[in-house]
Image: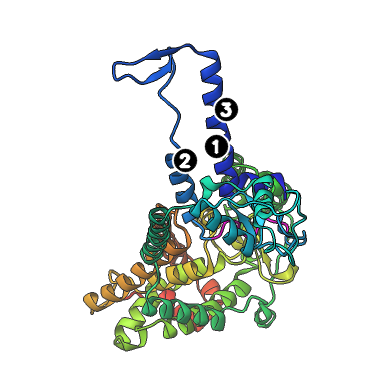
């Protein structure tokens, strides 16, 4: 038996404590002159009160044993080691009264001690006890029990046995109560989550195979001051891959450098290369149009959405589409190089690519920071889809009529998200608040996106590159 196993066995703990008590008592008697207290109790001068009583030690051991009804756990003994009774050599069942014995010798020792039996060996007092002859000489069998360390102090009285049973029952009841108090998802909440996860899987292709059907991305163009700075920006993003992951301070510093370079010239248009500056507009317009279709597909599967009036469905979709697209895009966003990776190298989008679709620093800086913040939350898929559904069902969107009904639907989703966090993140007290804050950040991004879209769409040569769906969703104000 290993040292670790001995240290955790209740019986051996008891024996160790008992030996310490006895040793301490002997040492005290030998080294300290006795003195009599006012009640006549003899104690060592200047010493602590008398050591714990044997019953007190037994009580502590009983309570420890009540945690597990067996004397040893599955991890305490080497299962491959032979377990032999130290008295008769039969197969042992565990530690009994401080020694490894079989059930037969355990019962024999208990009965002998309780009856205070006195046996006499009919021979010379040195019989060899085996499994076959252990009944022949009780005297030598009992002597062998004592020799291997069995102790009568470990035998529980009837009252102690009852107390032990009560302790075991109490432990079981406490465990059952703790289990009952654990946070759980209701059947309805589990169904909501399963439905949303399935909806996301059906509307999000992580192979990005459809991207090849879009108008091709065009990143080439005359090398101008803006393009040169943009290339430098992309290089900075790639080169700082490791640094960005080191610490929040390092990430903030790199982001600051990233956007100060943007402000210094990347985002400002050059009249000489206006066409090349927006060379990515056709491709990204197709990408956004495709994403809107997938958001609509997801929305149709959100519980309760299709029960709303057509007017409310349209109002919710028009107002939330870009926000849900930004949420969904976090799945492809990489902290390594601050880009969106959607398959092959042709469909890996850096900040510079988005500038070639007409967007500026006022949108891209908070967008990238939003994506970084989302990644830091390390959200599970279930939390991600719940957040998208909560974003969709916002009762304060322009043009919404049935505010009360939509608010009730959103509240149910919020409660489901909170319940999921309680179950899967017991220590995540602030996690829900951080997730909801991301929805507030999306509102600001939505507003800035609308401004930049309107500026772009006012120019016919650019608006003609947009798809009808993009024009319909982003181009019409919801009244």
Question: Mark number for residue 191?
Answer: none
On the rendered structure, is 436 left or right of 225?
left
Residue assigned mark 2: 57
C-alpha distance separating marks 2 and 3: 15 Å
Which tag is nearer the camera, tag 3 or tag 1?
A: 3
Element at badge 3?
helix
Query: Does residue 181 show up magenta in the picture?
Result: no
Residue at image point 55% right, 16% down: 30
Residue assigned mark 1: 17
C-alpha distance separating marks 2 and 1: 7 Å
Decide which of 121, 295 is in the foreground and name it.
Answer: 121
Decide which of 33, 379 is in the foreground and name it.
Answer: 33
Residue reaching furthest front? Answer: 122
Q: Earlier in the sequence, mark 3 or mark 1?
A: 1
The location of residue 5, given as percent across then percent down, is: 66, 49
Q: Is residue 444 above or below residue 244?
A: below
Residue at image point 35% right, 74% down: 393
Range of magenta residues: 70-78
Q: Dividing the picture into quarters, in which one does residue 254 lie? A: top right
The location of residue 127, given as percent across then percent down, is: 76, 54
Is residue 436 visible to us here? no
Q: Earlier in the sequence, mark 2 or mark 1?
A: 1
Decide which of 266, 372 is in the foreground and name it.
Answer: 372
Which tag is nearer the camera, tag 2 or tag 3?
A: 3
Residue assigned mark 3: 23
C-alpha distance separating marks 3 and 1: 10 Å
Tell whether label 1 touches label 2 (CB within 8 Å): yes
């Amino acid at each position: 038996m290993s040292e670790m196993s001995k240290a955790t066995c209740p019986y051996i703990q008891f024996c160790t404590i008992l030996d310490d008590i006895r040793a301490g008592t002997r040492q005290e008697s030998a080294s300290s002159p006795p003195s009599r207290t006012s009640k006549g109790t003899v104690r060592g001068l200047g010493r602590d009160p008398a050591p714990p009583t044997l019953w007190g030690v037994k009580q502590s051991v009983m309570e420890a044993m009540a945690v597990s009804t067996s004397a040893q756990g599955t991890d305490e003994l080497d299962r491959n080691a032979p377990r032999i009774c130290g008295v008769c050599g039969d197969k042992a069942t565990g530690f009994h009264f401080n020694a490894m014995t079989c059930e037969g010798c355990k019962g024999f020792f208990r009965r002998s001690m309780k009856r205070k039996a006195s046996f006499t060996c009919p021979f010379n007092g040195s019989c060899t006890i085996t499994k076959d002859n252990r009944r022949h000489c009780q005297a030598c069998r009992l002597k062998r029990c004592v020799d291997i360390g069995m102790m009568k102090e470990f035998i529980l009285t009837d009252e102690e046995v009852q107390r032990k049973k009560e302790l075991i029952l109490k432990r079981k009841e406490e465990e059952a109560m703790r289990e009952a108090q654990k946070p759980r998802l209701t059947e309805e909440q589990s169904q909501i989550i399963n439905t949303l996860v399935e909806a996301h899987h059906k509307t999000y292709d992580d192979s990005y195979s459809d991207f090849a059907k879009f108008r091709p991305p065009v990143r080439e163009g005359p090398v101008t001051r803006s393009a040169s700075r943009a290339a430098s920006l992309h290089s900075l993003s790639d080169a700082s891959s490791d640094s960005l992951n080191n610490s929040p301070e390092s990430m903030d510093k790199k982001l600051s450098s990233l956007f100060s370079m943007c402000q210094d010239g990347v985002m400002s248009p050059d009249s000489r290369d206006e066409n090349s500056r927006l060379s990515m507009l056709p491709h990204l317009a197709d990408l956004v149009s495709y994403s809107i279709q997938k958001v609509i597909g997801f929305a149709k599967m959100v519980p309760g959405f299709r029960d709303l009036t057509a007017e409310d469905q349209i109002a919710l979709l028009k107002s939330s589409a870009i926000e849900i697209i930004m949420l969904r895009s976090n799945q492809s966003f990489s902290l390594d190089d601050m880009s969106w990776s959607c398959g092959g190298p042709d469909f890996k989008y850096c900040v510079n690519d988005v500038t070639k679709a007409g967007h500026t620093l006022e949108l891209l800086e908070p967008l990238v920071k939003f994506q970084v913040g989302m990644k830091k939350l390390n959200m599970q898929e279930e939390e991600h889809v719940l957040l998208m559904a909560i974003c969709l069902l916002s009762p304060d969107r322009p043009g919404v009529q049935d505010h009360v009904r939509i608010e009730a639907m959103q509240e149910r989703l919020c409660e489901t998200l909170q319940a999921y966090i309680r179950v899967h993140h017991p220590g995540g007290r602030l996690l829900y608040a951080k997730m909801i804050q991301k929805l507030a950040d999306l509102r600001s991004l939505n507003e800035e996106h609308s401004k930049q879209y309107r500026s772009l769409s006012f120019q016919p040569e650019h608006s003609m590159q947009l798809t009808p769906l993009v024009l319909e969703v982003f181009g019409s104000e919801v009244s």
